[in-house]
Image (cartoon, grey):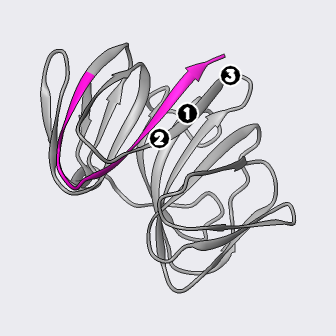
């Protein structure tokens, strides 16, 4: 497993220039916004506005903090509240209206036809079999033990698995999200 501390992430402008995001991880390493197979990021959303278009990309958005957003994708509206992952096509016109102030969100994207993804919330100690994926620790503190090493987790730290591994997740009163990627 690869440990990615939150303190080492730099803010980057959104593709459409409307805000900032912090990339957690992407594959292949060093890929850009037009060439990734998968990407995980955390964004701070302070104003209403359109989403960037990502051709041939499937997205899952999860509100991490704040009251939520009203997401409009190609004329269909959904109320996104904290903790409920919501998937949608990244190549359809989308925009968000904040429900009551700024939000922070987790954005998971994968290249349609090449990679599929799933986002799962983790709230209790457990053993987790992982393959290709990213775990983002959201709240509380804890520890993850892998086959070769371990990591003490703080809010917004992340771990990446690139091969099949078994992790023991330890802690109480925590929240984490695991994004699993499957090659098609």
Magenta segment includes 177: yes
Q: At which x and y percent is residue 91? A: 78, 48
Question: Which residue in the protein does label 3 denote?
Answer: 114
Q: Would you say 99 lies left or right of 75 here? A: left
Q: Residue at x 60, y 71 (%)?
A: 18
Question: Which residue in the protein does label 2 denote?
Answer: 120
Q: CA distance from mark 3 to mark 1?
A: 9 Å
Q: Residue at x 76, y 37 (%)?
A: 56
- Determine whether 150 is above or below 65 in the image: above
Q: Which secondary structure lies at badge 2?
A: strand
Q: CA distance from mark 1 to mark 2?
A: 16 Å
Question: Which residue in the protein does label 1 denote?
Answer: 38
- Chain part drawn in magenta: 167-184
Which quadrant holds the C terminus?
top right
Q: Which secondary structure lies at badge 1?
A: strand
Mark before the other along the chain sequence, 2 or 3: 3
């Amino acid at each position: 497993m690869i440990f990615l501390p939150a303190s080492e992430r730099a803010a980057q402008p959104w593709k459409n220039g409307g805000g900032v995001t912090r990339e957690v991880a992407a594959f292949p390493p060093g890929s850009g916004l037009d060439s990734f197979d998968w990407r995980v990021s955390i964004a701070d959303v302070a104003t209403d506005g359109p989403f960037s278009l990502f051709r041939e990309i499937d997205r899952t958005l999860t509100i991490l903090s704040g009251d939520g957003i009203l997401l409009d994708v190609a004329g269909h509206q959904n109320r996104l509240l904290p903790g409920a992952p919501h998937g949608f096509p990244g190549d359809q016109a989308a925009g968000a209206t904040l429900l009551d102030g700024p939000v922070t969100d987790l954005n998971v994207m994968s290249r349609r036809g090449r990679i599929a993804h799933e986002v799962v919330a983790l709230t209790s100690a457990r053993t987790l079999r992982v393959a290709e994926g990213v775990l983002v620790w959201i709240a509380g503190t804890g520890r993850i033990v892998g086959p070769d090493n371990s990591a003490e987790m703080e809010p917004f730290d992340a771990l990446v698995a690139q091969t099949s591994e078994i992790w023991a997740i330890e802690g109480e009163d925590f929240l984490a999200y695991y994004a699993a990627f499957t090659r098609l």
